[in-house]
Image: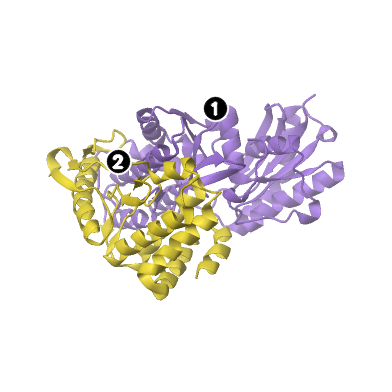
Chain colours: A yellow, B purple
Amino acid sequence: MKTRLPKAYRVDSLDTSIRLARTSREAHLLHDSKRAGVPTPTVYHVETATCTIVMEYVQGPRLKEAFAETSQLDLSRTCKLVGSLIGRLHSGGIVHGDLTTSNMILRDGKKLFFIDFGLSDYSRELEARGVDLLLMSRAFKSTHYALYSKAFRAVIDGYREVAGSHETQLIVGKMHEIATRGRYSERSQRGLLSNLE
Amino acid sequence: MPSLILGIESTAHTFGASIATTEGQILSDVKQVYIPLAGRGIHPREAAQHHSAIAHVVIREALTEAKVNAKELDGVAVALGPGLGPSLRIGATLGRAIASKLRVPLIAVHHAIGHIEIGALTTHSRDPLVVLLSGGHTMIAAFASRRWRIYGETEDITVGNLLDMFGRSAGLPSPGGPEVERLAAKGKNFIELPYTVKGNDVSYSGLLTASTKLLQAGLPVEDLCFSVQEVSFSMLAEAVERSLAHTEKKEVLLVGGVASNSVLRNKLDLVAREHAALFRAVDPRFAGDCGAQISWTGALAFTHHMFIDVRRSQVKPRWRVDEVDIPWR
Protein backbone atom coordinates (compact mmCIF):
# COMPACT_ATOMS: atom_id res chain seq x y z
CA MET A 1 0.00 0.00 0.00
CA LYS A 2 1.36 3.37 -0.97
CA THR A 3 -0.16 6.52 0.45
CA ARG A 4 1.02 9.96 -0.61
CA LEU A 5 1.03 11.85 2.66
CA PRO A 6 0.73 15.63 2.70
CA LYS A 7 4.10 17.39 2.53
CA ALA A 8 4.46 20.09 5.14
CA TYR A 9 6.86 22.03 2.90
CA ARG A 10 4.21 22.70 0.23
CA VAL A 11 1.27 25.08 0.54
CA ASP A 12 -1.98 23.12 0.87
CA SER A 13 -3.52 23.81 -2.52
CA LEU A 14 -0.31 22.98 -4.38
CA ASP A 15 0.25 19.89 -2.26
CA THR A 16 -3.25 18.53 -2.75
CA SER A 17 -3.23 18.95 -6.50
CA ILE A 18 0.20 17.33 -6.83
CA ARG A 19 -0.71 14.34 -4.67
CA LEU A 20 -4.00 13.76 -6.45
CA ALA A 21 -2.50 14.05 -9.91
CA ARG A 22 0.39 11.73 -9.09
CA THR A 23 -1.77 9.08 -7.45
CA SER A 24 -4.08 8.77 -10.39
CA ARG A 25 -1.23 8.99 -12.88
CA GLU A 26 0.80 6.33 -11.10
CA ALA A 27 -2.12 3.91 -10.99
CA HIS A 28 -2.78 4.28 -14.73
CA LEU A 29 0.86 4.09 -15.70
CA LEU A 30 1.65 1.07 -13.53
CA HIS A 31 -1.06 -0.71 -15.43
CA ASP A 32 -0.18 0.51 -18.90
CA SER A 33 3.52 -0.22 -18.38
CA LYS A 34 2.66 -3.87 -17.91
CA ARG A 35 0.90 -3.71 -21.24
CA ALA A 36 4.10 -2.30 -22.75
CA GLY A 37 5.92 -5.38 -21.47
CA VAL A 38 7.54 -3.93 -18.37
CA PRO A 39 6.99 -5.79 -15.08
CA THR A 40 5.35 -3.55 -12.44
CA PRO A 41 3.43 -4.27 -9.25
CA THR A 42 -0.21 -5.09 -9.99
CA VAL A 43 -2.63 -2.40 -8.88
CA TYR A 44 -5.52 -3.76 -6.79
CA HIS A 45 -7.30 -0.65 -5.65
CA VAL A 46 -7.02 3.14 -5.78
CA GLU A 47 -8.48 5.50 -3.22
CA THR A 48 -8.16 9.06 -4.43
CA ALA A 49 -9.59 10.63 -1.28
CA THR A 50 -6.55 9.53 0.70
CA CYS A 51 -4.16 9.39 -2.28
CA THR A 52 -3.65 5.68 -1.73
CA ILE A 53 -2.79 2.88 -4.13
CA VAL A 54 -3.09 -0.71 -2.95
CA MET A 55 -0.74 -2.86 -5.02
CA GLU A 56 1.15 -6.11 -5.18
CA TYR A 57 4.20 -6.43 -2.92
CA VAL A 58 7.30 -7.28 -4.95
CA GLN A 59 9.84 -9.26 -2.96
CA GLY A 60 13.50 -8.50 -3.57
CA PRO A 61 16.27 -5.95 -3.16
CA ARG A 62 16.26 -2.61 -4.90
CA LEU A 63 18.71 -2.66 -7.80
CA LYS A 64 20.87 -0.20 -5.87
CA GLU A 65 21.32 -2.74 -3.08
CA ALA A 66 21.74 -5.62 -5.50
CA PHE A 67 24.65 -3.78 -7.12
CA ALA A 68 26.23 -3.01 -3.78
CA GLU A 69 25.85 -6.45 -2.23
CA THR A 70 26.05 -9.13 -4.86
CA SER A 71 29.39 -9.62 -6.49
CA GLN A 72 27.95 -12.54 -8.40
CA LEU A 73 25.42 -10.31 -10.13
CA ASP A 74 25.99 -10.25 -13.86
CA LEU A 75 26.35 -6.52 -14.29
CA SER A 76 26.24 -6.38 -18.08
CA ARG A 77 23.25 -8.68 -18.32
CA THR A 78 21.28 -6.81 -15.65
CA CYS A 79 22.07 -3.39 -17.12
CA LYS A 80 21.13 -4.64 -20.56
CA LEU A 81 17.82 -5.73 -19.09
CA VAL A 82 17.37 -2.27 -17.56
CA GLY A 83 17.98 -0.73 -20.98
CA SER A 84 15.62 -3.04 -22.82
CA LEU A 85 12.84 -2.40 -20.28
CA ILE A 86 13.30 1.36 -20.70
CA GLY A 87 13.18 0.75 -24.45
CA ARG A 88 9.89 -1.13 -24.09
CA LEU A 89 8.38 1.63 -21.94
CA HIS A 90 9.38 4.23 -24.51
CA SER A 91 8.13 2.12 -27.41
CA GLY A 92 4.83 1.92 -25.55
CA GLY A 93 4.63 5.71 -25.41
CA ILE A 94 5.52 5.98 -21.71
CA VAL A 95 8.33 7.84 -19.95
CA HIS A 96 9.11 6.91 -16.35
CA GLY A 97 10.34 10.32 -15.17
CA ASP A 98 12.40 9.10 -12.20
CA LEU A 99 14.70 6.32 -13.35
CA THR A 100 17.11 5.45 -10.56
CA THR A 101 18.41 2.18 -9.18
CA SER A 102 16.20 2.82 -6.13
CA ASN A 103 13.12 2.53 -8.32
CA MET A 104 13.82 -0.95 -9.67
CA ILE A 105 13.38 -4.19 -7.75
CA LEU A 106 15.21 -7.37 -8.66
CA ARG A 107 13.13 -10.48 -7.92
CA ASP A 108 14.89 -13.83 -7.67
CA GLY A 109 18.03 -12.23 -9.10
CA LYS A 110 16.61 -12.07 -12.60
CA LYS A 111 13.19 -10.48 -13.01
CA LEU A 112 13.27 -6.70 -12.84
CA PHE A 113 10.27 -4.62 -11.73
CA PHE A 114 9.95 -0.87 -12.27
CA ILE A 115 8.22 1.05 -9.47
CA ASP A 116 7.43 4.65 -8.49
CA PHE A 117 5.56 5.97 -11.49
CA GLY A 118 4.51 9.23 -9.80
CA LEU A 119 6.51 11.37 -12.23
CA SER A 120 5.64 9.28 -15.28
CA ASP A 121 3.79 10.44 -18.32
CA TYR A 122 2.45 9.41 -21.68
CA SER A 123 4.83 10.89 -24.19
CA ARG A 124 6.53 9.96 -27.41
CA GLU A 125 8.55 13.16 -27.52
CA LEU A 126 12.26 12.80 -28.02
CA GLU A 127 12.86 15.38 -25.28
CA ALA A 128 10.97 13.39 -22.64
CA ARG A 129 12.69 10.15 -23.59
CA GLY A 130 16.07 11.90 -23.60
CA VAL A 131 15.46 13.23 -20.07
CA ASP A 132 14.53 9.72 -18.96
CA LEU A 133 17.83 8.28 -20.15
CA LEU A 134 19.77 11.25 -18.82
CA LEU A 135 18.33 10.66 -15.34
CA MET A 136 19.29 7.00 -15.61
CA SER A 137 22.81 7.94 -16.60
CA ARG A 138 23.08 10.41 -13.69
CA ALA A 139 21.92 7.74 -11.26
CA PHE A 140 24.66 5.39 -12.42
CA LYS A 141 27.25 8.15 -12.45
CA SER A 142 26.52 9.35 -8.91
CA THR A 143 25.61 6.15 -7.08
CA HIS A 144 27.57 3.55 -9.01
CA TYR A 145 30.48 5.68 -10.23
CA ALA A 146 32.89 2.74 -10.31
CA LEU A 147 30.62 0.83 -12.68
CA TYR A 148 29.40 3.83 -14.63
CA SER A 149 30.90 3.44 -18.11
CA LYS A 150 30.43 -0.31 -18.33
CA ALA A 151 26.96 -0.21 -16.80
CA PHE A 152 25.56 2.62 -18.83
CA ARG A 153 26.99 1.26 -22.05
CA ALA A 154 25.12 -1.97 -21.35
CA VAL A 155 21.93 0.02 -20.67
CA ILE A 156 22.24 1.63 -24.10
CA ASP A 157 22.95 -1.75 -25.71
CA GLY A 158 19.76 -3.13 -24.18
CA TYR A 159 17.83 -0.06 -25.28
CA ARG A 160 19.13 -0.46 -28.82
CA GLU A 161 17.89 -4.06 -29.01
CA VAL A 162 14.34 -2.83 -28.51
CA ALA A 163 14.34 0.61 -30.10
CA GLY A 164 16.73 -0.02 -33.01
CA SER A 165 19.95 1.80 -33.72
CA HIS A 166 18.41 4.76 -35.51
CA GLU A 167 16.09 5.69 -32.62
CA THR A 168 18.84 5.05 -30.09
CA GLN A 169 21.22 7.33 -31.93
CA LEU A 170 18.59 10.08 -31.98
CA ILE A 171 17.92 9.72 -28.26
CA VAL A 172 21.56 9.63 -27.24
CA GLY A 173 22.08 12.79 -29.29
CA LYS A 174 19.12 14.42 -27.54
CA MET A 175 20.46 13.35 -24.16
CA HIS A 176 23.71 15.07 -24.97
CA GLU A 177 21.87 18.22 -26.00
CA ILE A 178 19.87 18.29 -22.74
CA ALA A 179 22.97 17.60 -20.64
CA THR A 180 24.77 20.56 -22.16
CA ARG A 181 21.81 22.91 -21.74
CA GLY A 182 22.38 23.77 -18.08
CA ARG A 183 25.27 25.87 -16.87
CA TYR A 184 28.69 24.20 -16.50
CA SER A 185 27.35 21.33 -18.53
CA GLU A 186 28.61 17.81 -18.62
CA ARG A 187 31.58 18.08 -20.91
CA SER A 188 33.08 14.95 -19.45
CA GLN A 189 30.14 12.96 -20.77
CA ARG A 190 30.72 13.96 -24.34
CA GLY A 191 33.44 11.40 -24.89
CA LEU A 192 31.32 8.57 -23.62
CA LEU A 193 28.20 9.74 -25.38
CA SER A 194 29.89 10.04 -28.74
CA ASN A 195 31.17 6.48 -28.33
CA LEU A 196 27.65 5.30 -27.76
CA GLU A 197 26.25 6.84 -30.91
CA MET B 1 52.28 27.13 13.68
CA PRO B 2 49.36 27.11 11.19
CA SER B 3 50.01 28.37 7.67
CA LEU B 4 48.39 31.54 6.35
CA ILE B 5 46.55 31.50 3.04
CA LEU B 6 45.24 34.44 1.03
CA GLY B 7 42.09 33.62 -0.92
CA ILE B 8 40.81 35.59 -3.89
CA GLU B 9 37.26 35.31 -5.23
CA SER B 10 36.25 36.97 -8.50
CA THR B 11 34.04 34.51 -10.36
CA ALA B 12 31.05 36.80 -10.91
CA HIS B 13 29.83 40.08 -9.36
CA THR B 14 31.82 39.84 -6.11
CA PHE B 15 35.48 40.60 -5.63
CA GLY B 16 36.52 39.16 -2.28
CA ALA B 17 39.75 38.59 -0.41
CA SER B 18 40.29 36.72 2.83
CA ILE B 19 43.00 35.28 5.04
CA ALA B 20 42.46 31.81 6.51
CA THR B 21 44.70 29.57 8.56
CA THR B 22 45.20 25.87 7.91
CA GLU B 23 43.52 25.31 11.30
CA GLY B 24 40.24 26.75 10.05
CA GLN B 25 40.28 30.29 11.38
CA ILE B 26 38.96 32.97 9.05
CA LEU B 27 41.07 35.98 10.02
CA SER B 28 39.43 38.38 7.58
CA ASP B 29 36.83 38.46 4.84
CA VAL B 30 36.51 41.61 2.74
CA LYS B 31 34.44 42.10 -0.39
CA GLN B 32 33.04 44.61 -2.81
CA VAL B 33 30.13 43.77 -5.06
CA TYR B 34 29.55 45.09 -8.55
CA ILE B 35 25.96 46.29 -8.84
CA PRO B 36 24.60 46.31 -12.40
CA LEU B 37 22.46 49.18 -13.63
CA ALA B 38 18.84 48.94 -12.48
CA GLY B 39 16.93 46.37 -14.48
CA ARG B 40 20.05 44.81 -15.97
CA GLY B 41 22.02 41.68 -15.26
CA ILE B 42 25.76 41.34 -14.77
CA HIS B 43 27.71 42.71 -17.70
CA PRO B 44 30.90 40.59 -17.68
CA ARG B 45 33.19 43.35 -18.93
CA GLU B 46 31.80 45.93 -16.50
CA ALA B 47 32.12 43.47 -13.64
CA ALA B 48 35.76 42.91 -14.59
CA GLN B 49 36.37 46.67 -14.74
CA HIS B 50 34.79 47.04 -11.31
CA HIS B 51 37.00 44.28 -9.90
CA SER B 52 40.21 45.63 -11.37
CA ALA B 53 39.47 49.10 -9.97
CA ILE B 54 38.93 47.96 -6.35
CA ALA B 55 40.97 44.75 -6.13
CA HIS B 56 44.06 46.25 -4.51
CA VAL B 57 41.99 48.00 -1.83
CA VAL B 58 40.10 44.80 -0.98
CA ILE B 59 43.26 42.69 -0.76
CA ARG B 60 45.05 45.28 1.36
CA GLU B 61 42.08 45.52 3.72
CA ALA B 62 41.97 41.73 4.05
CA LEU B 63 45.63 41.77 5.13
CA THR B 64 45.16 44.70 7.52
CA GLU B 65 42.05 43.24 9.12
CA ALA B 66 43.83 39.91 9.65
CA LYS B 67 46.88 41.77 11.00
CA VAL B 68 49.00 39.85 8.53
CA ASN B 69 51.92 41.17 6.54
CA ALA B 70 51.96 39.97 2.92
CA LYS B 71 55.42 38.51 3.55
CA GLU B 72 53.96 36.15 6.16
CA LEU B 73 51.65 34.45 3.64
CA ASP B 74 52.37 30.78 2.92
CA GLY B 75 50.18 30.42 -0.14
CA VAL B 76 47.77 32.21 -2.46
CA ALA B 77 44.50 30.56 -3.45
CA VAL B 78 42.36 31.80 -6.30
CA ALA B 79 39.02 30.70 -7.74
CA LEU B 80 39.87 29.70 -11.31
CA GLY B 81 36.26 28.79 -12.13
CA PRO B 82 33.54 28.29 -12.90
CA GLY B 83 32.25 31.75 -13.72
CA LEU B 84 32.50 34.68 -16.07
CA GLY B 85 35.77 34.74 -18.03
CA PRO B 86 36.58 38.45 -17.71
CA SER B 87 35.85 38.46 -13.95
CA LEU B 88 37.82 35.27 -13.39
CA ARG B 89 40.86 36.66 -15.17
CA ILE B 90 41.13 39.62 -12.78
CA GLY B 91 41.42 37.35 -9.74
CA ALA B 92 43.65 34.88 -11.58
CA THR B 93 46.06 37.58 -12.75
CA LEU B 94 46.37 39.03 -9.26
CA GLY B 95 46.75 35.62 -7.66
CA ARG B 96 49.55 34.66 -10.04
CA ALA B 97 51.30 37.99 -9.55
CA ILE B 98 51.15 37.90 -5.75
CA ALA B 99 52.23 34.26 -5.52
CA SER B 100 55.15 34.86 -7.91
CA LYS B 101 56.24 38.02 -6.13
CA LEU B 102 56.13 36.37 -2.68
CA ARG B 103 57.58 33.09 -4.04
CA VAL B 104 54.79 31.05 -2.42
CA PRO B 105 52.65 28.32 -4.00
CA LEU B 106 49.58 29.15 -6.07
CA ILE B 107 46.47 27.09 -5.34
CA ALA B 108 43.55 26.67 -7.76
CA VAL B 109 40.16 26.51 -6.04
CA HIS B 110 36.84 25.47 -7.56
CA HIS B 111 34.31 28.13 -6.59
CA ALA B 112 31.50 25.67 -5.77
CA ILE B 113 33.77 23.51 -3.64
CA GLY B 114 34.58 26.73 -1.82
CA HIS B 115 30.87 27.17 -1.04
CA ILE B 116 30.68 23.60 0.26
CA GLU B 117 33.84 23.76 2.40
CA ILE B 118 33.01 27.09 4.06
CA GLY B 119 29.57 25.62 4.78
CA ALA B 120 31.08 22.49 6.29
CA LEU B 121 33.52 24.55 8.35
CA THR B 122 30.90 26.88 9.83
CA THR B 123 28.34 24.16 10.56
CA HIS B 124 30.67 21.28 11.49
CA SER B 125 28.96 19.04 8.94
CA ARG B 126 30.85 15.83 8.28
CA ASP B 127 29.22 13.82 5.51
CA PRO B 128 26.24 15.86 4.29
CA LEU B 129 23.96 15.82 1.31
CA VAL B 130 24.91 19.24 -0.03
CA VAL B 131 22.37 21.59 -1.56
CA LEU B 132 24.21 24.37 -3.39
CA LEU B 133 21.95 27.19 -4.51
CA SER B 134 23.29 30.39 -6.01
CA GLY B 135 23.28 32.48 -9.15
CA GLY B 136 25.65 30.02 -10.76
CA HIS B 137 24.60 26.67 -9.31
CA THR B 138 21.53 24.66 -8.41
CA MET B 139 22.84 21.30 -7.44
CA ILE B 140 22.41 18.41 -5.01
CA ALA B 141 25.62 16.50 -4.30
CA ALA B 142 27.20 14.01 -1.93
CA PHE B 143 30.80 12.98 -1.46
CA ALA B 144 32.07 9.51 -2.35
CA SER B 145 35.49 8.19 -3.22
CA ARG B 146 37.45 11.43 -3.74
CA ARG B 147 34.76 13.36 -5.59
CA TRP B 148 31.50 15.20 -5.14
CA ARG B 149 28.88 13.17 -6.99
CA ILE B 150 25.94 15.05 -8.43
CA TYR B 151 22.54 13.57 -7.64
CA GLY B 152 20.38 16.34 -9.02
CA GLU B 153 20.70 19.71 -10.67
CA THR B 154 18.79 22.21 -12.74
CA GLU B 155 18.26 21.29 -16.35
CA ASP B 156 18.21 24.93 -17.43
CA ILE B 157 18.50 28.10 -15.29
CA THR B 158 19.53 28.19 -11.63
CA VAL B 159 17.22 29.18 -8.79
CA GLY B 160 19.34 32.32 -8.29
CA ASN B 161 18.84 33.16 -11.96
CA LEU B 162 15.10 32.63 -11.64
CA LEU B 163 14.81 35.00 -8.67
CA ASP B 164 17.11 37.58 -10.30
CA MET B 165 15.33 37.55 -13.64
CA PHE B 166 11.85 37.54 -12.13
CA GLY B 167 12.94 40.36 -9.80
CA ARG B 168 14.27 42.39 -12.71
CA SER B 169 11.07 42.03 -14.68
CA ALA B 170 9.25 43.31 -11.58
CA GLY B 171 11.61 46.28 -11.45
CA LEU B 172 13.28 45.13 -8.23
CA PRO B 173 16.91 45.95 -7.52
CA SER B 174 19.63 43.35 -8.00
CA PRO B 175 20.23 40.76 -6.60
CA GLY B 176 16.58 39.75 -6.79
CA GLY B 177 16.45 37.06 -4.07
CA PRO B 178 16.26 39.23 -0.94
CA GLU B 179 13.75 41.60 -2.56
CA VAL B 180 11.54 38.76 -3.74
CA GLU B 181 11.67 37.33 -0.21
CA ARG B 182 10.69 40.67 1.32
CA LEU B 183 7.69 41.14 -1.02
CA ALA B 184 6.68 37.49 -0.75
CA ALA B 185 6.14 37.94 2.98
CA LYS B 186 3.29 40.31 2.08
CA GLY B 187 1.77 37.93 -0.48
CA LYS B 188 -1.39 36.10 0.56
CA ASN B 189 -2.81 34.33 -2.45
CA PHE B 190 -1.18 31.35 -4.02
CA ILE B 191 -1.15 31.54 -7.81
CA GLU B 192 -0.68 28.29 -9.69
CA LEU B 193 2.59 28.15 -11.65
CA PRO B 194 4.45 25.38 -13.52
CA TYR B 195 5.95 22.86 -11.09
CA THR B 196 8.60 20.83 -12.93
CA VAL B 197 10.50 18.08 -11.14
CA LYS B 198 12.24 15.42 -13.20
CA GLY B 199 13.62 12.78 -10.88
CA ASN B 200 16.10 14.66 -8.71
CA ASP B 201 16.34 17.41 -11.32
CA VAL B 202 14.41 20.65 -11.54
CA SER B 203 13.63 22.95 -14.45
CA TYR B 204 12.84 26.62 -13.92
CA SER B 205 12.50 28.12 -17.39
CA GLY B 206 8.75 27.42 -17.60
CA LEU B 207 8.18 28.92 -14.17
CA LEU B 208 10.10 32.05 -15.14
CA THR B 209 8.14 32.54 -18.37
CA ALA B 210 4.76 31.94 -16.71
CA SER B 211 5.41 34.19 -13.73
CA THR B 212 6.75 37.01 -15.91
CA LYS B 213 3.67 36.79 -18.13
CA LEU B 214 1.32 36.97 -15.15
CA LEU B 215 3.23 39.95 -13.86
CA GLN B 216 2.74 41.73 -17.18
CA ALA B 217 -0.94 40.77 -17.04
CA GLY B 218 -1.17 42.85 -13.86
CA LEU B 219 -1.35 40.27 -11.07
CA PRO B 220 -0.15 41.58 -7.70
CA VAL B 221 3.63 41.42 -7.44
CA GLU B 222 3.48 40.33 -3.77
CA ASP B 223 1.30 37.31 -4.61
CA LEU B 224 3.57 36.42 -7.49
CA CYS B 225 6.73 36.69 -5.37
CA PHE B 226 5.06 34.47 -2.79
CA SER B 227 4.02 31.92 -5.41
CA VAL B 228 7.35 31.92 -7.28
CA GLN B 229 9.13 31.20 -3.99
CA GLU B 230 6.62 28.54 -2.95
CA VAL B 231 6.80 26.69 -6.25
CA SER B 232 10.55 26.95 -6.87
CA PHE B 233 11.50 26.04 -3.29
CA SER B 234 8.96 23.21 -3.04
CA MET B 235 10.43 21.74 -6.22
CA LEU B 236 13.85 21.87 -4.62
CA ALA B 237 12.57 20.41 -1.36
CA GLU B 238 11.08 17.52 -3.30
CA ALA B 239 14.31 16.90 -5.26
CA VAL B 240 16.26 17.03 -1.99
CA GLU B 241 13.82 14.64 -0.37
CA ARG B 242 14.22 12.16 -3.19
CA SER B 243 18.03 12.44 -3.10
CA LEU B 244 17.97 12.01 0.67
CA ALA B 245 15.89 8.85 0.37
CA HIS B 246 18.27 7.53 -2.28
CA THR B 247 21.57 8.41 -0.56
CA GLU B 248 20.38 7.84 3.03
CA LYS B 249 22.62 10.65 4.31
CA LYS B 250 22.05 11.87 7.85
CA GLU B 251 22.90 15.55 7.30
CA VAL B 252 21.65 18.16 4.84
CA LEU B 253 23.90 21.17 4.29
CA LEU B 254 22.54 24.21 2.48
CA VAL B 255 25.15 26.53 0.95
CA GLY B 256 25.34 29.37 -1.59
CA GLY B 257 23.76 32.82 -1.78
CA VAL B 258 20.16 31.56 -1.74
CA ALA B 259 20.91 29.83 1.61
CA SER B 260 20.08 33.07 3.39
CA ASN B 261 16.40 32.77 2.37
CA SER B 262 14.41 31.76 5.45
CA VAL B 263 11.42 30.34 3.54
CA LEU B 264 13.76 27.93 1.78
CA ARG B 265 15.57 27.04 4.98
CA ASN B 266 12.25 26.14 6.63
CA LYS B 267 11.25 23.86 3.79
CA LEU B 268 14.55 21.99 3.75
CA ASP B 269 14.47 21.71 7.53
CA LEU B 270 11.05 20.02 7.27
CA VAL B 271 12.35 17.58 4.66
CA ALA B 272 15.44 16.73 6.71
CA ARG B 273 13.42 16.14 9.88
CA GLU B 274 11.09 13.76 8.11
CA HIS B 275 14.10 11.66 7.10
CA ALA B 276 15.73 11.86 10.54
CA ALA B 277 18.53 13.97 9.13
CA LEU B 278 20.07 17.10 10.60
CA PHE B 279 19.58 20.30 8.65
CA ARG B 280 22.23 22.99 8.68
CA ALA B 281 22.77 26.11 6.60
CA VAL B 282 26.01 27.97 6.05
CA ASP B 283 26.69 30.96 8.31
CA PRO B 284 24.86 33.82 6.50
CA ARG B 285 28.06 35.92 6.48
CA PHE B 286 29.60 33.35 4.15
CA ALA B 287 26.49 32.38 2.16
CA GLY B 288 27.04 34.69 -0.79
CA ASP B 289 30.28 34.70 -2.81
CA CYS B 290 33.20 35.67 -0.58
CA GLY B 291 36.95 35.43 -0.22
CA ALA B 292 36.66 33.14 2.81
CA GLN B 293 35.28 30.24 0.75
CA ILE B 294 38.45 30.41 -1.33
CA SER B 295 41.00 31.04 1.45
CA TRP B 296 39.67 28.15 3.56
CA THR B 297 39.43 25.69 0.64
CA GLY B 298 42.88 26.89 -0.39
CA ALA B 299 44.12 26.11 3.12
CA LEU B 300 42.73 22.56 2.85
CA ALA B 301 44.43 22.11 -0.52
CA PHE B 302 47.64 23.63 0.88
CA THR B 303 47.90 20.96 3.56
CA HIS B 304 47.76 18.38 0.76
CA HIS B 305 50.33 20.19 -1.37
CA MET B 306 47.87 20.75 -4.19
CA PHE B 307 49.74 23.52 -5.95
CA ILE B 308 49.42 24.67 -9.51
CA ASP B 309 52.17 25.90 -11.83
CA VAL B 310 51.56 29.56 -12.65
CA ARG B 311 52.08 28.80 -16.34
CA ARG B 312 49.25 26.27 -16.24
CA SER B 313 46.84 28.34 -14.17
CA GLN B 314 44.46 29.41 -16.92
CA VAL B 315 40.88 30.16 -15.86
CA LYS B 316 38.20 27.51 -16.32
CA PRO B 317 34.85 29.28 -16.89
CA ARG B 318 32.94 25.97 -17.26
CA TRP B 319 34.74 23.85 -14.66
CA ARG B 320 32.41 21.17 -13.26
CA VAL B 321 32.39 20.29 -9.60
CA ASP B 322 32.45 16.53 -10.26
CA GLU B 323 35.73 16.89 -12.18
CA VAL B 324 37.73 17.89 -9.09
CA ASP B 325 39.67 15.28 -7.11
CA ILE B 326 39.57 15.98 -3.38
CA PRO B 327 42.17 14.33 -1.12
CA TRP B 328 41.14 15.96 2.16
CA ARG B 329 37.75 14.26 2.61
Q: Is residue B166 shown left or right of residue B134?
A: left
Residue B198, position as x, y percentages in the image: 36, 52
The answer to whether residue B105 of the structure is visible from this angle is yes
Q: Is residue B237 shown left or right of residue B10?
A: left
The answer to whether residue A183 of the structure is visible from this angle is no
What chain does mark 2 sit on?
Answer: A
Count of marks, rendered view = 2
What is the secondary structure assignment of the residue under circle 2? loop
What chain does mark 1 sit on?
Answer: B
Kind of residue at disc 1: Thr
The label shown at residue B123 is 1
Q: Is residue B220 shown left or right of residue B7?
A: left
Asked if marks 1 and 2 fall on the same chain, the answer is no
Q: Camera-side residue: B74 or A131? A: A131
CB within 8 Å, label 1 to label 2 = no
Residue B258, position as x, y percentages in the image: 47, 40
> Which residue is located at x 46 percent, y 69 percent?
A173
Q: Is residue A43 shown left or right of residue B88?
A: left
The residue labelled by disc 2 is A59
Kind of residue at disc 2: Gln
> Which residue is located at x 75 percent, y 37 percent?
B302
Query: Considering only vertical position in the picture, is A181 above or below A1?
Result: below
> Which residue is located at x 60 percent, y 36 percent?
B117
Q: Quadrant of residue B59?
A: top right
Residue B242, position as x, y percentages in the image: 38, 41
Q: Circle 1: is it few (<14), some (14-19), or many (20+) Cα within 10 Å?
A: some
Frontmost of labels 1 and 2 is 2
